[in-house]
Amino acid sequence: MQKFLLGLLFVSCSSMCLHLHAAELKQAEVINGDSATDYLFSWSTVPHNETVNIEWSYDPSFVPGTGTHIAKTNQSQAHWKAKDGKKRRYFAITTESGDTEKVAVRLLPLEGGRNFRDLGGYKTSDGRTVKWGHVFRSGTMHSLTSSDYSYLSDVGIRTICDFRDQRERDDEPTNWQAGDLDYKVFADPKERDSSENPMFATLLDPESSPEDVKLSMAAGYSDIALREKEGYTAMFKELVNGNVPLAFNCAAGKDRAGTAAALILTALGVPEQTVVHDYQLSDDYVDFTSEFLNPEKREKALAAEDHPYAFLYKLPPEKVAPLLSSDPIFIETSFADLKEKYGSVLNFIKQELNVSDEDIEKMRNALLI
């Protein structure tokens, strides 16, 4: 009996010790440092200060253990400088017990990019993760440089969904130079009359405040999802058909593209809190006030006879500021409106964007790990 109890105690202790030693990674991420070739890694482990291995590959689907080794450390951060120039890299941070997180720089380090970023790395409600290197969101691509296109050639984008109208495309055309595209989707060539948006009535009201403008914009934000149905339907069709890597864009990369990103992440099962986080990241990545209200833009807009936003440059900057933000209230209100009308955002995607349950399952199997 004594031997049995000792044996049981030994087995139980061994199991417990093994369980405690199985370190779990938390909050693993990588960002660019002072340049596009500097990488700053940070993470935490449970238990604390477990040793991790960091490796990289050009292939977002690489198997941990097959990449190029960078570091092995029990610290909670690391710095690494690449020696072969600006390239799109994907990293794996792995504990000694085998828990792994794939990470990549979310905002692509492009000289002429606007809000061009990867939708990978987000956790879904069922414990899976959105694959890196498969779906990208962006603003206008008009100013991409030859260096940017060299970088994007490694990404291998094969499908572009452009949500801008024809006038916007004519003003800032995309001249893609990162390899042939198998598919190119220009979703809606029609020109839109911005003056029809009720929010602009609030904006032009001399008695309205910046807060009034923000609330008016939030109230009408679900109109984006409905107005862009044709483009969003085309985008989901490409995703269902596996035409990835795919990039979608509008002009600023925050409203039409922001709503598109929110719908894709929702369809993949990413929790709403995370969807809102991705939406508001645009404010962290882009100074839209500087981008859109700079003197050069102002002069060009006021000189053009038919510039759709010339009137904005005649308004007080503080009243225009809400239009240039990615306040969480915008996407939260949009989702609340869609839920009220359709029961859920996922139901809106199914009913209005022609995405079936089978399509959703197909996308999840292809875009999640």
Image: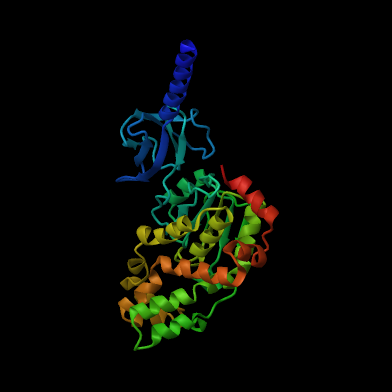
267, above or below 33, in the image: below
Judge from the rendering whether residue 363 lies leftward or rightward of residue 283; answer left or right.
Answer: right
Residue 343: x percent and y percent? 60, 67
Q: Residue at x 43, y 54 (%)?
A: 145
Q: Is residue 104 above or below residue 278?
A: above
Instruction: Tell how many labels.
Output: 0
The colour scheme applied to this rendered structure is: rainbow
Determine the image quadrant of residue 185: bottom right
Image quarter of the C terminus:
top right
Residue 350: x and y in percent read 65, 62
- Residue drawn at x 50%, y 55% as measured from the top left: 271
Q: Residue at x 34, y 63 (%)?
A: 287
Q: Residue at x 63, y 50 (%)?
A: 363
Front position in the image: 318 or 335: 335
Q: Give residue 139's position: percent from left, percent from top.
A: 46, 62
Q: Please, is residue 61 above or below residue 189 in the view?
A: above
